[in-house]
Image: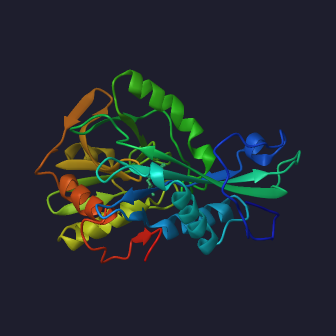
Amino acid sequence: AKCRPGESFTEGKIVPYGDISISPCCPILNYGQGLFEGLKAYRTEDDRILIFRPHENALRMQDGAERLCMSSPSVEFFVEAVKQTVLANKKWVPPPGKGALYIRPLLIGSGAILGVAPAPEYTFLIYASPVGDYHKASSGLNLKVDHKSHRAHSGGTGGVKSCTNYSPVVKSLVEAKSSGFSDVLFLDAATGRNIEEASACNIFIVKGNIVSTPPTSGTILPGITRKSVSELARDIGYQVQERDVSVDELLEADEVFCTGTAVVVKAVETVTFHDKKVKYRTGEEALSKKLHSMLTSIQTGLVEDTKGWMVDIDPC
Ligand code: PMP
């Protein structure tokens, strides 16, 4: 779908997957004016297809559009477009327990313009692909704390899902992976002492009955899984705190886990900071295991969705 500034997206169409044509002087190519989202659709045992919290992705895209001076789809348009995309790709939604259909909405500055300015036109598109587990590591992630580079700066775009947030991360990720780590954990740029998030997921630490996660004050992405998992942890009696978490506290934690659309809820097995490597609780007794099971039971329709999180693409 396309629209001009000040107009709204009103119609779109389903086309076979393929290349798109774009002007060489469009703002997404030259200035990175673009946002994306990521969400999943799951097949249930009784063959329904459920999408996890698409309204939240729509709202997050709107926040990002406001930050990047772009026009964005209305919540209704976004959710309907996601539903139609899943409906058209129904056969690609894996069987229950075998993964999910990952859905990628993109909002980009298109049209042609030479200088730095809001785009003369916006393009909203969605593609989808079946996916399995994001990280191969079965027992847990091995994170490397990056003490050299940062992914976001105060006042920047770290709090929205801007395409440009990801390019500075690739170098750290490649280096970490080549040394055998599963992901990189970034520290805040302001003090270099507090943990922020990994390349594409949020982080939690557990100490006793207290679960803590860094605040969404503009330099980390307000994850939808983060928000959902915080609610589930509170439901089972944990105290959940959104606050600055220092790297020292991280190294002292009983348990650490990551959340995100791709990883869902994943235990962290080790964290390495400079020469120090710490091992955490994982496996059956870990809180992350319980939260993973609670969340995926809702997502795959195994338990009743009392929270109203799931959208059935074809309710009848
Ligand atoms: N942080 C970053 C940088 C991400 O890319 C993602 C994935 N969208 C997340 C956190 C987790 O967000 P969500 O739970 O909404 O997928």
**Residue 201: percent from the left, percent from the top?**
41, 49
In this rendering, the answer to whether 60 lies above or below 204 is: below
Q: Residue furthest left?
A: 285
**Total residue callouts:** 0
- Would you identify the image quadrant in which residue 272 lies? top left
Task: From the viewer's side, name the closer residue of 132 and 212.
Answer: 132
Q: Nearer the viewer, residue 82 or 155?
A: 82
**Image side of residue 192 versus residue 277, left or right:** right
Residue 5, x across and y down, in percent:
81, 65
Q: In this view, does 148 lie above or below 263?
A: above
Residue drawn at point x = 46 percent, y = 32 percent: 173
Q: Is residue 209 above or below residue 171?
A: below
Q: Which of 297 and 146 is in front in this view?
A: 297
Using residue 164 as the reference point, say whether residue 250 is left or right of it.
Answer: left
- Side of 231 relative to 117 (left or right): left
Q: Position of residue 118 (x, y in %)?
A: 80, 57
Q: In which quarter of the image is residue 44?
A: bottom left
Across and down, in percent, residue 159 comes to 54, 57
- Between 126 and 176, the one nearer to me in the picture: 126
Answer yes or no: is residue 275 visible.
yes
Residue at x 56%, y 57% (from the top left corner)? 88
From the image, which quarter does the C terminus lie in? bottom left
Q: State the residue at coordinates (58%, 45%).
A: 165
Quadrant showing the N terminus = bottom right
Do we see residue 156 in this rendering? no
